[in-house]
Amino acid sequence: MAQVILKNIKKVYPHHESKKKKKGAEDKQLSLQVTDEGVVAVQAFDLDIQDKEFIVLVGPSGCGKSTTLRMVAGLEDISGGDLYIDGQRVNDVAPKDRDIAMVFQNYALYPHMSVRENMAFPLKLRKVAKDEINRRVEQAAEILGITQYLDRKPKALSGGQRQRVAIGRAIVREPKVLLMDEPLSNLDAKLRNQMRAELIKLRQRINTTFIYVTHDQTEAMTLGDRIVIMKDGVIQQIGTPQQVFDHPANLFVAGFIGMPQMNLFDAQLVCEDGQYAVKLDRVQVVLSDAKQENLSRKQVKPGPIILGVRPEHLQLTGEAEQMLHGTVEVSEMMGSAVHVHLHAYNRDTILIVPTDKPENPVSFPYGSKVCFTFNGSTAHLFDPDT
Ligand code: ADP
């Protein structure tokens, strides 16, 4: 059992410390709250993580993901709030007594030790019997497919193999909670995809709770049972991948989750005969029943809104006066679909046009006009002021 509860967790880096903040986070820092005590890197962080759940913290660089993870690990003091592991408040419990293991981005292997020694090291420290150490190291090596490298030194391994050793060293301890901080970000794109699939398999074979940090929305979507999306030290939304994709809580989440990004348009919400519709240019689309209900319940007033439509939900139409339209800037043939980048209504807009429908064109010359529309069930509405 390993349930992890973060209750109103806060982290403030005192001013003298925040000067040595991470490279690259400089301008992001400006949007974090600054108080007399220092820079507020994380605030009001509430999350109940279930036993064996795979939680992903995701957000742009500097939003407080690593800080949160390091507080769970005990590598960073907690400035406010309560952290519980299996019902025990652990704010002041030393890292080694939290029964947690962490995998870092840079692997952090001991260069002078073999793979076997690296993996055995945390068990030796805990004075586990030799036979048991061998059993666990060999089992972890087998799960991770690194049995043939057990006697090599880290420098004789590829990046992907080193990362497997680092994961192996974490799992031999059979920790209650496994923390991973951007574990794939030093790998090239192909290896990253492969390791991502292997993490999914690993997760099925070991019984532990995972907390995983990444800035990559694809990793978050594919790995997480639930995703926690953060910005400027504040949680924006918590949900399953499907929930955050289908019902983004705000414009930030809408722009962050989904590839390519959701299209946004400045539109109008209208209400005629008690029916809500969204109007863009000459197109007026009545919203779905669920959205009608939601808007009526919140008594939303007609007026300017931001309309969001995912690229896969914009439909290509024949050229017609009453349709939406844009001008082709770039078109990318992706095999099963063409990604058509348009300039439409003062915004960059992407349309995904499947190639398996004979009626769809596959060529979209630069500067040509494309007509499209959307429907009320896949339209997302956002308040322009948020
Ligand atoms: P992320 O993991 O999302 O990239 P971090 O948790 O590393 O973000 O950082 C959040 C904020 O806290 C950033 O503005 C960063 O500069 C600052 N920060 C991180 N570590 C320290 C530290 N040890 N001392 C001072 N400020 C820090």
Image: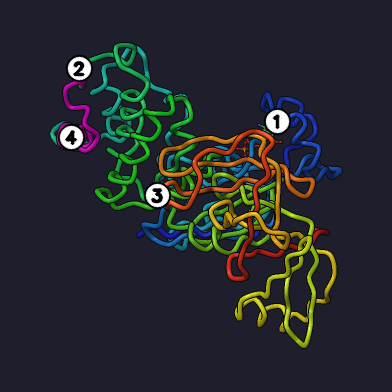
Mark 2 or 3: the one toward you: 3
Label 3, on which residue? 356
Q: CA distance from mark 3 to mark 1?
A: 44 Å
**Rendering coords of residue 81 (x, y %):** 65, 57
Q: Amino acid at mark 1?
A: Ala
Q: Amino acid at mark 2?
A: Asp
* Residue 142 circle label: 4
Mark 4 or 2: the one toward you: 4
Q: CA distance from mark 4 to mark 1?
A: 39 Å
Label 1, on which residue? 25
Tell me: is circle 1 under 8 Å from ligand 1. yes
Give the residue displayed 76% in from the left and 87% down from the top: 274
Q: Earlier in the sequence, mark 4 or mark 1?
A: 1
- Furthest-bottom residue in this view: 273
Disc 4 residue crowd, few under 14, some 14–19, many 20+, Cα 10 Å: few
Q: Earlier in the sequence, mark 4 or mark 2?
A: 4
Q: Do labels 4 and 1 touch, CB within 8 Å? A: no
Residue 94 is at least partly visible in this image: no
Q: Earlier in the sequence, mark 2 or mark 1?
A: 1
Disc 1 residue crowd, few under 14, some 14–19, many 20+, Cα 10 Å: few
Image quarter of the N terminus: bottom left
Q: CA distance from mark 4 to mark 2?
A: 14 Å
Q: Magenta segment range? A: 132-149
Q: Earlier in the sequence, mark 2 or mark 3?
A: 2
Q: Amino acid at mark 4?
A: Glu
In the rendered structure, the answer to whether residue 206 lies left or right of residue 176 reads: left
Mark 3 or 1: the one toward you: 3
Disc 3 residue crowd, few under 14, some 14–19, many 20+, Cα 10 Å: few
* Residue 151 circle label: 2
Q: CA distance from mark 2 to mark 1?
A: 39 Å
Q: Amino acid at mark 3?
A: Asp
Q: Residue 189 sits in which quadrant? A: top left
